[in-house]
Amino acid sequence: MSKSKRTYTTDVRKDWQDMVAETLRAIDRHSKIYLQEDKDDFHMQSYYILKQYLVNLKSWIHLHEKKLENNNE
């Protein structure tokens, strides 16, 4: 799998950008399989689990960035 081509201005995002990209690919894959191939509930459950993980990760990233920003003031 190739590395993410995105660049970020904070070290926090840089450390997680590949994980976010991989998770998005997994979400897309589970969605595609569910909708186009077999309607297996495993794929829909995996889609929702990964989606929630990504929401939680992005929230944590934002909070961590804010803490670092406040420490630098």
Image (cartoon, rainbow, N blue to C red):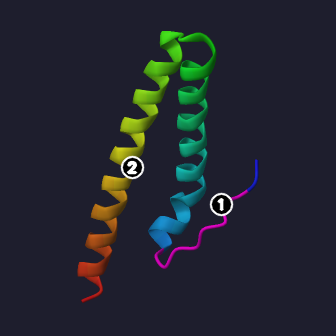
Question: Which residue position is annotated with label 2?
Answer: 57
Rendered location of residue 55, percent (x, y):
35, 46
The residue lying toward the viewer, choosing from 37 and 24, is 37
State yes or no: residue 17 in magenta: no
The amino acid at mark 1 is Ser
Residue 6 shown in magenta: yes
Work out whether residue 67 or residue 37 is closer to the camera in this orientation and state it. Answer: 37
Image vertical order of residue 36 relative to residue 14, above or below? above
Q: Could you tell me which quadrant the C terminus lies in?
A: bottom left
Q: Find disc 1 in the rendering and name its residue.
A: 4
* Rendering quarter of residue 36: top right
Callout 2 amino acid: Leu
Asked which secondary structure carries label 1, the reply is: loop
**Residue 72 placement, left or right of 12:** left
Measuring from the top left, give residue 66's x and y in whole percent: 27, 71
Q: Which residues are drawn in magenta?
A: 3-10
